[in-house]
Image (tube, rainbow, N blue to C red):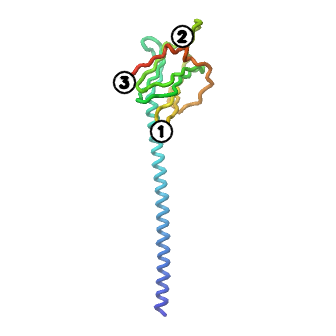
Amino acid sequence: MDDEASDSRHKHAREWLTFLVAAMAVVVAVLGYIQSRAANHDATKARKATERRSEREQASLVDFIVWNREGVRTLSIANHTRQTINDVKVIFDDETYLTVGSVPGCVMWYMGPLKTTDEYGAEHEVVLPARLDFTDSQYPTTKWTLTRTLDKRKPEPELTEDLTALFGGQMTTVTTAC
């Protein structure tokens, strides 16, 4: 009888040990799963931050300035990237605008002088400051607004007049070295 009681106690102890080992294995598996999800989340955050920095780096290679070019006050867009920027629009302070379209990589776009006369002899001058809206060529594309700082696209104001036809003859491009 003592042998049967002893075997029963050993069997009962083995069952509890088996249960405890299985429970510990489940706990270790769950902890490993939680840790791998946390590591995956951290890696995703780091990848997205790197992508945002890369987007901003590319977009920051676009310059938008007013300067004197050969003695003429000129508006200039310099695309120092190797990629075309699209949907390029210059919006002036009085909410008039120029539709530039696209500026290829390694190209300077100029418009000058900043005054012109229409077919009736009326003089028109763009009202500065201005802002530049464009879309980069990276995938996925990002819309940007460039004023004194570079930001994700700001809402467009209520635009009043397209000056593209009026100033079209004063727009030129020059290929540069990137």
Q: CA distance from mark 1 to mark 3?
A: 26 Å
Instruction: Answer few, some or many: residues within 10 Å of disc 3's Cα (few below 14, many 20 plus, some between 14 and 19).
Output: few
Q: Nearer the viewer, mark 1 or mark 3?
A: 3
Residue beneath disc 2: 116
Instruction: Answer few, some or many: residues within 10 Å of disc 1's Cα (few below 14, many 20 plus, some between 14 and 19).
Output: few
Q: Where is 133 relative to 38, above or below? A: above
Residue beneath disc 3: 177
The amino acid pointed to by label 3 is Ala
Relative to 127, 178 lies left or right: left
Q: Secondary structure at mark 3?
A: loop
Q: Are marks 1 and 3 in contact (CB under 8 Å)?
A: no
Residue 52 numbered tag: 1
Occupied quadrant, residue 61: top left
**Residue reaching furthest to the left:** 177
**Considering only order in the chain, which callout, 3 or 1, is on the residue closer to the N terminus?**
1
Q: Where is 140 relative to 93, above or below? A: below
- Image point 43% across, 30% down: which residue? 83
Q: CA distance from mark 2 to mark 3?
A: 31 Å
The amino acid pointed to by label 2 is Thr
Q: Where is 72 relative to 80, above or below? A: above
Q: CA distance from mark 1 to mark 2?
A: 40 Å
Relative to 40, 166 lies left or right: right
Q: Are marks 1 and 2 in contact (CB under 8 Å)?
A: no
Q: Nearer the viewer, mark 1 or mark 2?
A: 2
**Quadrant of the image containing the C terminus:** top left
Give x and y (percent) for residue 39: 46, 53
Q: Secondary structure at mark 1?
A: helix
Residue 140 numbered tag: none
**Considering only order in the chain, which callout, 2 or 1, is on the residue closer to the N terminus?**
1
- Image point 57% across, 9% down: which residue? 118
The amino acid pointed to by label 1 is Arg
Give x and y (percent) for residue 2: 47, 92
